[in-house]
Amino acid sequence: MMPPIFKAYDVRATYPDKLNEAAAWKVGLATGTFLATQPNRPAGKNAGSVVVTRDMRPHSPPLAEALIEGLRASGLGVIDLGMCDTSFQYFAINFLGTSGGVQVTASHNPINYNGFKISGPQARPIGADTGLKEIEKIANTLGERGSKPATGTLQTMDLWREYRAHIHKFLNPPPAAARPLKVFIDASNGMAGKLVPKVFEGIPNLEIIPINFDFNAKWAHEPNPLVAENMKPTQEGVLKHKADLGVCFDGDADRCILTDEKGEIIGCDHLTALLAGYFLGASRGSVVIYDLRSSKAVEEAVRGAGGVPVKSRVGHVFMKALLRETSGIFGGELSGHFYFRDNFCTDSGAIAFAAALSVLTRMGKPMSELVAPFKRYPQSGEINFRAEDKAGIMAGLKTQYGASGKVEELDGVSVDAWEKLGWWFNVRASNTEPLLRLNAEAKDKATLAKLLAELTPKLGTPDTGHH
C-alpha cells in the first residue's frame, strides 16, 4: 500500500518519509495509465504526451525524475519543461495539446513537503472526484520502481517566450502607454523568482523592486501570503520604496496577494470586485464567479458593471468547473486564486498581477482609491472553531436561522438575511480537522458585532492556530 499521500485536490506529503522517489515513480505510472484512458484526449501530435514541470524545492528534481520515469513506463511520452510556476503548466498543456500534465510542488507548504498537482486534457484539474482516487487505486497495485521499462519518449522544451506573449495579452493597455509604475514584489523564494524576470522584465514604464527572488534551502518566510506575518516584507517594502503596488506570491506562483500603495493588504474579494469591472468592460453580460465567502460588494460590483454574479464553492476544482460550465469571463477566490476564461479557465498569479497593472494604468488613480468603494461593509474574516460534532452544529444553525433569511447549502450552511436584517454568514466544516470556519458580514459594525456575539457561542471553542 502507498503511504497516505493522496489528498482532496492533489498528492502532498513530507519528503522523504512519505513522499519519495519510489512513491513518485508509482504516481507517475498510475497517472500515465489513467490519462491514457481519458475520453476527451486531444487529437494533435502531442496527444500521446504529458507535460512535467517542477518548483524550486531542493527535492523537486529527483522527484520529477522518478515521476517522469513512471509516466514513460505507462507508454506516454513526456515533455519536460523544467522549473516553472504551476500556471505555466496549464498554459503548456493547452498550447502543446497534450493529454495532461503534472507539476511537482507543495505550493505554500513548508520546505520539507512536496507533492504533485495533476491535470488532464485542457488542464482540467484532477482531484479526488475527477480521477485522483482511481490513480491512487492503480498506484496501490504496482510493483517497485523500474519493474516496468520506460518506453515513452522524453523531450525537453523551453516555452518561456510563448508564455510571456500569452501573459502580455492581459496587459491592456500596456504600461508603456501611461505613467510609470513602481511595484514591490516578494517572490517568497519561490517560482515568482523565475516567472517575474522572464515575463515582466523589460516592460517600458514598469519598475520592479524584487525581494526573495533567489532559490535556496533557506527561505525568508513560508511561501504562504495568506498568513499575515508573511505579508510584512511586502507591506514594509511598498512604503519604503514609495511603490504603487505590492505583490507577494506563494511558492508555486499560481496565487498572489496584493497591497495598495499605503501597504494595506487588499482583500481578494475586493480585488475580485475591482477586476470584475475591468474584465466586464469589454464583455458586458458575462458571468463572473466568486467565492461564497466574498463580500456582498462583489455581487453588487458585478451587477453594476453589467455582469452576472455566480457564487461558487470554495476550492480551485469547483471554481474552474463552474467557470467552464457558465462560460464565465473571470473568477476570484479568497485564497488568492484568480481564474480567467482566456487562460483556459485556469488560475494564474501572473495574469492577476498583469490585470492589476492594467487597471492601475487605465484608471490613473492610486490603488487604495480604486479599492476603497468595495470596502464598504464590515467583515468578520475567517474565524475557526474547534468542534467535534460539526454536522450537528450545522444542522442546528439551519433550524435556528431558517426563519431569519435564505438558507443555502452550496458549501456548508449559509444564511442570507441581507435585505431583512442586514447580515449574512457562512459556516463550513474543514475536510481534514475537527474545525468549523465562520465568515460573516453586515451592513454596519453594530449589526456585525451583535450577530457574532449571538453566533460564536454556538460554534465550539475559538481556535487560534494557522490553517
Image (cartoon, rainbow, N blue to C red):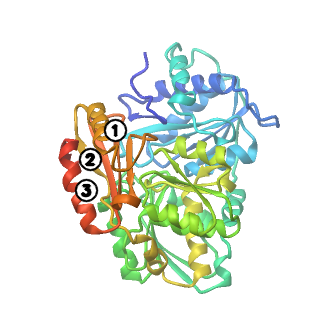
Disc number placed over residue 451 in the picture, else none: 3
- Can residue 363 be seen here? yes
Residue 106 vs residue 379, the one in the foreground: 379
Give the labeled residue for mark 1: 430
Q: Which residue is mark 2?
A: 384
Measuring 39% from the left and 72% from the top, which residue is drawn there? 376
| Picture quarter with the N terminus | top left
Q: CA distance from mark 2 to mark 3?
A: 16 Å
Does residue 45 sit above or below 442 in this rendering? Answer: above
| Mark found first going from the N terminus, 3 or 1 | 1
User: What's under tag 3, amino acid-wise?
Assistant: Leu
Badge 3 element: helix
The amino acid beneath tag 2 is Asn
Assess disc 3: are there few (<14), some (14-19) or many (≥20) residues with their C-alpha within 10 Å of its C-alpha: some
Q: Amino acid at mark 1?
A: Ser
Identified at 27% across, 62% down, the residue is 448
The answer to whether 40 is drawn above or below residue 289 in the figure is: above
Category of crowding for the residue at label 2, using alpha-carbon neighbours closer than 10 angstroms: few (below 14), some (14–19), many (at least 20): many
User: Which residue is at 43% across, 55% downward?
Assistant: 334
Disc nearer the start of the sequence (2/1): 2
Q: Nearer the viewer, residue 179 or 74?
A: 179
Mark 3 vs mark 1: in front: 3
Q: Quadrant of residue 32?
A: top right
Q: Residue at x 57, y 73 (%)?
A: 357
Q: Position of residue 185 (x, y in %)?
A: 46, 69
Secondary structure found at label 2: strand
Cβ–Cβ under 8 Å for marks 2 and 1: yes
